[in-house]
């Protein structure tokens, strides 16, 4: 029988996303955090979604997290079956904790689905998730509010875009931006599909790489920067964490330096008080502007030459892996990971 104050949390992870494996790593840590003695009042049900969108029951999902079970990852539907939740038991869930990074998990897709279950869920809703994911939509809103950002140029390719179109586009990009230039898919994450280009003849290849992920693309002027990150949690009242800095050996924070190569995280970042205040204010202002709540990580660039702060992006499903900044930031702000995950569920339920 269910005890009175017990809350059943459904953790959803994996997903049709190029950050599938990152999600599994994040979910492992969140699951472990809920098993800590302080979190006895939470009962956990796990929902693994594999790379092709098949949902798995609690026991199977648990084996993915605790035994590194990989045999379900690439299993596909038979063409006859499209009812992906047919055998899945959603009963008794009091709150959802979706921890799928990138497409389908961070862009409003799963949020729309969870909204239909009429149960609260951790993180932003459909609108905030979609806006936070799409680098073009996000930047246009920030420009409107005069939130400082690097120079950028939005691009929409389509299936019929020819080599000639890409050449014309290259000329436009070079008219607007100085090298180095970052070419990014508008909807991606973990630096996947991003190139840093230094020459005109590298642009077309970078556009093609980005377009494999999204036809919406953003080109940005590359600055020589320090990278600072700030955690945000809350709903009507948003709170900010300490600010952290990430340092890496590579030229920029690419996929390898995010997850394989050792990077250095410094919390609190060595910055002056006014920069710290500025970052925290911008973190809250930008989350409010996009209707983002629950939890988020706001990422900033501090230009070395000028000491100017630019908002890079808001991540609405921040990483929870062993190397992830978000839980470290909150730990430095006084919340251990078990307290953090509990607080996130309570925020989702209470507000
Ligand atoms: N305009 C820029 N100037 C300097 N570095 C950049 C710029 N844009 C991206 N980068 C580098 O690329 C990384 C990934 O870019 P980002 O836009 O944050 O993509 P993602 O959403 O995949 O994390 C950044 O953390 C930074 O190291
Ligand atoms: Mg980023």
Image (cartoon, rainbow, N blue to C red):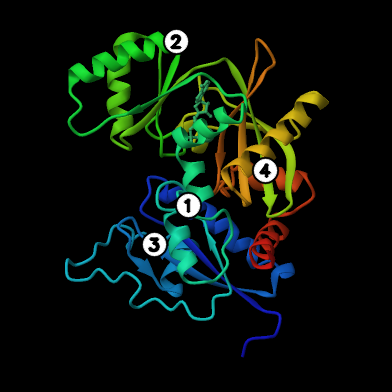
Asked whether 342 or 126 is in front, the reply is 126
Badge 4 vs badge 2, beta-carbon distance below 8 Å: no
Q: Which comes sooner in the sequence, label 4 or label 2?
A: 2
* Neighbours of disc 3 within 10 Å: few (<14), some (14-19), many (20+): many
Give the secondary structure at mark 3: strand
Badge 2 vs badge 1, beta-carbon distance below 8 Å: no
* Neighbours of disc 4 within 10 Å: few (<14), some (14-19), many (20+): many
Give the secondary structure at mark 2: loop
* Neighbours of disc 1 within 10 Å: few (<14), some (14-19), many (20+): many
Residue position for label 1: 23
- Residue 231's disc is 4
The residue most toward the right is: 273
Cα distance between the residues tagged 2 and 1: 33 Å
Please tell me whether residue 160 is drawn above or below residue 44 in the rendered image.
above
Q: Position of residue 65 (x, y in %)?
A: 48, 62
Q: Quadrant of the N terminus?
A: bottom right
Give the secondary structure at mark 1: helix
Query: Residue placed at 28% from the left, 19% from the top?
Result: 204
Please tell me whether residue 4 is drawn above or below residue 276 in the rendered image.
below
């Amino acid at each position: 029988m269910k005890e009175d104050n017990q809350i059943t949390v459904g953790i959803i992870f994996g997903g049709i996303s190029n950050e599938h494996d990152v999600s599994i790593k994040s979910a492992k840590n969140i699951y472990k955090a809920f098993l800590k003695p302080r979190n006895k009042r939470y009962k956990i049900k796990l929902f693994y979604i594999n790379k092709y969108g098949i949902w798995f029951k609690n026991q199977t999902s648990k084996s993915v997290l605790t035994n590194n079970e990989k045999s379900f990852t690439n299993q596909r539907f038979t063409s006859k079956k499209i009812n992906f939740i047919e055998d899945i038991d959603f009963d008794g869930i009091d709150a959802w904790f979706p921890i799928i990074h990138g497409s389908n998990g961070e862009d409003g897709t799963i949020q729309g689905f969870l909204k239909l279950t009429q149960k609260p869920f951790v993180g932003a809703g459909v609108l905030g998730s979609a806006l936070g994911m799409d680098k073009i939509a996000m930047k246009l809103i920030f420009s409107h509010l005069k939130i400082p950002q690097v120079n950028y140029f939005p691009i929409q390719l389509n299936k019929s875009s020819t080599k000639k179109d890409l050449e014309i586009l290259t000329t436009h990009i070079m008219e607007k931006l100085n090298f180095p230039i970052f070419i990014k898919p508008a909807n991606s994450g973990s630096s996947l599909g991003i190139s840093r280009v230094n020459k005109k003849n590298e642009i077309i290849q970078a556009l093609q790489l980005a377009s494999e992920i999204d036809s919406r693309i953003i080109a940005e002027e590359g600055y020589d920067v320090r990278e600072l990150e700030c955690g945000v949690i809350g709903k009507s009242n948003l709170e900010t964490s300490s600010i952290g800095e990430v340092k890496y050996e590579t030229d920029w924070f690419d996929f390898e330096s995010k997850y394989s190569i050792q990077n250095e995280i410094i919390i609190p970042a060595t910055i002056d008080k006014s920069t710290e205040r500025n970052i925290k204010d911008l973190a809250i202002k930008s989350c409010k502007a996009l209707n983002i709540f629950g939890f988020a990580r706001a990422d900033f660039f501090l230009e070395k030459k000028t000491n100017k702060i630019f908002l890079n992006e808001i991540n609405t499903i921040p990483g929870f892996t062993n190397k992830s900044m978000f839980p470290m930031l909150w730990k430095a702000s006084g919340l251990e990971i078990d307290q953090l995950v509990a607080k996130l569920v309570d925020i989702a339920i209470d507000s």
